[in-house]
Amino acid sequence: MQPHRNFERYQRDALRIALSHYVTNGLSAALGLLLISGCIHLLLGPFAAAAASVGVVVCIPPDQPAPKRGKFWQLLPAFVIGLPLFYAVQVLHAAPILLGLLLVPASFLAFLAGGWGNRGLPISVSVMFAMVFSMAVPDHTNSTTNLATCLYFTLGAVSYLVWATLANAVLNARYRVQMLADTLFALAKLMRSQAQQFTPAKEAEKARRAPLIGTLLQQQAALADQLQAARNILLESPSTTRRQQLADMLIGVLDMRDHLLVCNLDLDTLRNHPGHEPVLRTLSDVLEALAQEIDALADALMRGRTPMLFASHRPQLENLQWGHEGTVPADGTPPAILAMGMSSRIGHLNDDSLRLLALARGELAPNVGLVRTNWQLFVSPTVWSWEPFYALWRWNAPPLRHAIRAALAIGTAYAVSLVLPWGSHDYWILVTIVVVLRGSLAQTLERRNSRAMGTLIGCVLAGLLLYAHITPLLVLLMVTLAQALAHAFAIRKYLVTAIAATVLGLLQVQMLNAGPSPVFDVVERMADTLIGVAIAWAFSYVLPSWERGQIAALVKRALAAQARHARVALGLWQLQAVDNAPELQWRLARREAFDSLSALVQATQRSLSEPRAVRPPLVPLGRLLALSYQLLAQLTTVKTMLLLQRERLTPHEVDLPLQQTAHTIEAALEARSALAQTDLPATAALEWSVLGDPFDGDLSPWLLRRLRLAESIALELRSHADQVVRKLAAANTAKHP
């Protein structure tokens, strides 16, 4: 029975991959390569097709699923920068010294595109590909041939720019569905991890289960990144009913993330209370069931089917037995009341899941007023700007150091290639460095291992194809398939990309200039790859940008985002607003809070691959991250009370505490005196000890309790942030006394 279940799981996972947006994008890129190269092959011959395919390959890296608006301009820099470098390399190929003098500064400028962030990295790769693949063109001595080759390159590149822009527009509807489905998968994964948190403390200790906080933080960061990628496409011009449904579902996912976040509130108290073990197990089972239903909904969207109905779990939650009280916690809150609140939060997740299902089935009209009128606020900019480069010209700027590091590595690799006894394919070492050397040691090590293994496998596959002397048409088909896989999995699974890229590179060379010994080409490829991997690995320690160098700035950004979120979430003016402006401000503040924490989590995770001597202080940093999400959870609960249950609050009891808490949190996170920054009158401590039924009657005591807990967390968060900054400063002082 177990093998059958494993087969079904593998089959399901394979189908999800096959229907994903990145595979669709890879197939689109490969089809463009096939059509452009094939047409030019028929009209102008095999060499023209091979040179044009280089132009296509150069423009492919930045071709990712994107909004229709600005797609052409997203791709254009790869061609505009790559073309003159492609021609210059051909002209100088007969002069190795001059070519080396070109490669080093050009590589520096290419990798400096990392200043544009994630948008700039594909441009760096494209520009380097333009130079490296230009070195593969066989005839560099005839100026007429060089000019013709550049014209073929231009023809292929421009054709692909048009193809990619049109394909992105045609696939836009499909990308919207796929992006939403991927977001739902990420949400379901987070829900499963959250369900494991409900394991009673004694059972978790008995099973020696590792703490899940690290996993939860990583999954929260991954979901934040996935949400932003989905926003960029789903929130663009929601002008049709289907687009509005999908956009509304995405907003529903944002709300579900908030409800998942607040599920951690009071959890430690309940896990250590033996009377509520059955309740926790039931809540865990409900979360697991909801995760499965979200997965099923995403699968149905992927396959273009109407999602199956699933039943509400409200009856299961309402029939819970809350257990005996036993020992009351130190804060005086009855555990049964806390358990009821926990059940209510999971009930909200249940209701949100049913709403997503109704929207997907077309049974509920979408509420798109907020999305349709303000979508531009949540979509990443598509224009290129020089502004990010103004701050790069300082010695400790990571993009600048990486550009210098990469230029030195390329120069070294080129010098090594000139003295190798085979030396006929000097560009292979350079290709390896381009794709392996990353901005952080963690990413470089991951790509180093995948590149070495992928090259070995790819060489074997390519060797078999070359040894079989397949026809030019079959070579073109294999290149197309390899391009599809290489582009599709470049970010998701680099081992697959390394295998496909190796096959692509060897066959591309065969198309440009079939060598005298294909088998020896394969041996060269393996040797050159190992040399390139070794050089990239060695230079990852040259002018290193250790993660601790940016941790302090990331901590500052996270605290500032938390302070702004607190100010907006606790603002009284939102209760009297007659439009959506407060809601928009809160959503923007919330997004920045999650994005800033995502960046900090990822930097912390990458630092685990660095030498122990240069790692940031991981213990206080981990506690800081956990407290940051706790503060978000507390404020999200308060925000929910203010917006959805304001009629059950007593204004004169909560208005002043709301203002005080907002000022206290801002003062704590911004490290300033609260009394010096506010004219609010001093009051006694918040009185919240008398708590009634949270589902009936006045909610003011519960809101006051949340406010006091939020203040306490903010103060503790400030303490851990100061500890992190002090340890980072001490480490820098020890390094540079």
Image: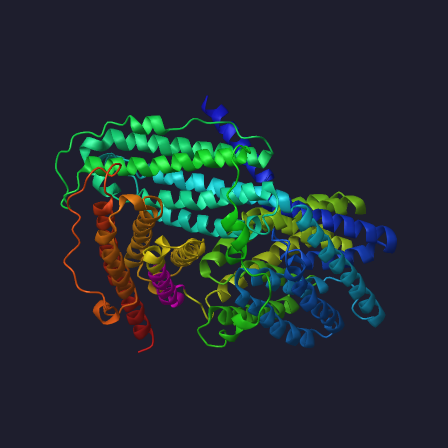
The part of the image, by quadrant, that contains residue 406 is bottom right
Q: What stretch is highlighted in magenta?
A: 547-565
* 40 and 634: which is toward the camera: 634
In the rendered view, tell whether residue 76 sits above or below residue 323: below
Query: Does the magenta-highlighted stretch encompass residue 675?
Result: no
Image position, residue 465 (x, y; %): 72, 44
Residue 678 visible in image = yes
The part of the image, by quadrant, that contains residue 126 is bottom right
Image position, residue 32 (x, y; %): 73, 50
Residue 456 visible in image = no
Q: Residue at x 72, y 70 (%)?
A: 84
Q: Please name the colour scheme applied to the rendered image.
A: rainbow
Q: Main secondary structure of the magenta part?
A: helix
Image position, residue 130 (x, y; %): 68, 64
Q: Residue at x 22, y 30 (%)?
A: 322
Q: In this view, does 603 lie to the left or right of 476?
A: left
Query: Does the magenta-highlighted stretch encompass residue 564?
Result: yes
Q: Is residue 3 left or right of residue 50?
A: left
* 427 and 161: which is toward the camera: 161
